[in-house]
Amino acid sequence: MRNLLLVAVSTFAMAVPAVAQDDSQIVIADERVEPITVTATGLELPVGDTGQSITVIDLSEIQSVQGPDLSRVLRRLPGVTFSRNGGAGGFTGVRVRGAGSEQMLVLIDGVKVNDTGAPGGGFDFGNLLAGDVDRIELLRGPNSVIWGSDAMGGVMNVTTRLTDGIAASGEYGADDTVYGTLSAGMVGDRVEAGLTGSYYDTDGYSASANGTEPDGFRQWQLTGRGRYWLADGLSLNANGRYAKGKLEQDGYEWVAPYAFIDTSDLQDTREWSGRVGADYAGEKLTLRAGYAVSDTRRLYTGESYGDYPYETNGRLRRAELFGRYDLFEAVALDFGADREWSRFADSGVTRSSTLTSGHGRFSWNGPVVKLAAGARYDDHQFFGSEWTFGANGAVELGNEVRLRASYGEGFKAPTLYQLFSFYGDTSLKPERSRGYDAGIEKGRRDGKFFASASLFRRDSRDLIDFDLVNSVYYNIGEARAQGAELELRSRPVDALQLGLVWSYVETEDRTAGSYYEGRDLNRRPRHAVTASADWLTPVGLTLGSDVRLVGDSFDDRANSVSLDGYVTVDLRASVPMGETFEIYGRVENLFDTGYETVATYNTGGRAAYAGARLRL
């Protein structure tokens, strides 16, 4: 591991890189508006006004990384690792600070999109492509006080594109891959609205590490959002997303040795989500109300399923209200209420549930000290009542140095699949967690210099797993994840941007008396490093590199199957051709590193791509 870390840091020190761009324009500025988050309270709040660990990545950084694979952007976030079942379109689970991929709540334009039809109720990032994304914000740690069930490990909010004018991009590369996006919109004094469409098609490579037949993926996606101001401070808004994809998959043979092999399986996925609402911002009172729906359907057919195709459908409907009232100078009350209707259907069963919730949070936002504390009450149709608590604070020490700390509780109700499917158990209890976080930071992430260091710990109990012997879901007991994060960003000169993110996570199964006690949680590497460098050359050419190092881990709960650590290097370049047009290209996995994030599943080798962007 020490040698791998040395390689990553050395490459970072020598790398020649890509300055963040907004379409074809280089973004170089010292004075910027402080990033805003909605993951902390459900309403807009400057990141500096909370003691929670939150990172925001904007459009310029997303486009500088290039390409449709959003995981290449997410690996720049502290505490993030991921695993993927094969190539593009394969299930992609994102883990934050050692939490399970199903324990992070994912919002797209404020809509909960976790799949209520999936066994664990997580979100598959394999179906979300980067070209439709304008902004990503990630809160690391439990935050069920504001968001309720599913926010055990963190909350990620993805904002889709809204272009003032017309923007388009297209690229072609390895495995006969074609990717194109088109965005059009307008931003006026009273109206803003826009649509973005994308199409992706690749021949891919074998999902099975031992296979030879390529497994392709094809998807088209449409997103849109808009707002109309009825009066000063009062607006109506709406957003929507539709994605439809077809993924070729491999499967297991049903005779000894039961190997994972090439098969002709298919997964058809259709996702749609949307929200309509109204916002009011007065002198003291701010309100946001809305009604949202997310729906995910998956159909599995092919050789492994024979004459018995399998289909799942999950739908979540949610009515919500978020509010903030300024009681007096520096003191505010955040409050809210919501009701959710969940439904799960597969080839043999249809079930539904309801969840009714309310929360309150007091905050003190002084010039030096910022404090907040709150509680949430949930009433679940099957599990009764649940209370969760949270608190955070920050102290400004001067010279842009800031101390912060937070405590948060999380809970996650068993999914309808875990309760009522053929493998379900109606006696399951909700999962619960308690998270602690403390850190110090200097500067701002988009400024000349930024440094942030954090220590964290999360204790979880009643975690749900699958019993392979009895073929049923059960509560396994306790687990702990703890570690440290470090992020450094520097712009020593206007044309050069350097970045480094390092995460160290120790995980442990702490179920007393079990066979697994003391073992690492599966697919949680201890070390994860991303080093990046971005350089605008004197001739106008932008060059860049990302180096990713991931440490060793285990694929299974028994820690009997190892996943070796790896280092990958990506290179990229772009050059503007006038003020509205840009051409770009990149090489991913430059040294053709072979590795696995899920045992027996393949990963991509060296691949090159070229494309262009237009902005009118």
Image (cartoon, rainbow, N blue to C red):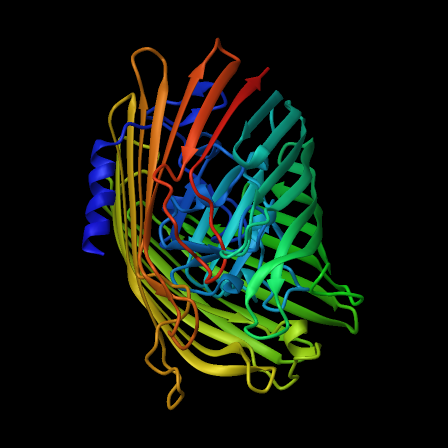
Q: Is residue 323 left or right of residue 369?
A: right
Q: Residue at point 67% right, 34% down?
A: 227
> How many marks are shown on the rendered structure?
0
32 and 512: which is toward the camera: 512
602 and 121: which is toward the camera: 602
Q: Quadrant of residue 445?
A: top left
Residue 172 in the image, given as x and y percentages of width and height: 56, 28
Q: Residue at point 60% right, 44% down?
A: 109
490 and 614: which is toward the camera: 614
Residue 158 in the image, given as x and y percentages of width and height: 54, 45
Residue 219 in the image, given as x and y percentages of width and height: 67, 41
Quadrant containing the N terminus is bottom left
| Residue 390 drawn above or below residue 533 | below
253 and 196: which is toward the camera: 253
Q: Residue furthest top?
A: 578
Report if residue 600 is visible in the image: yes
Q: Residue at point 77% right, 64% down?
A: 309
Quadrant containing the C terminus is top right
Q: Residue furthest bottom?
A: 513
Report if residue 293 is visible in the image: no
Residue 606 in the image, given as x and y percentages of width and height: 42, 38
Q: Is residue 282 left or right of residue 544?
A: right
| Residue 505 drawn above or below residue 385 | above
| Residue 506 drawn above or below residue 369 | below
Q: Quadrant of residue 95?
A: bottom left
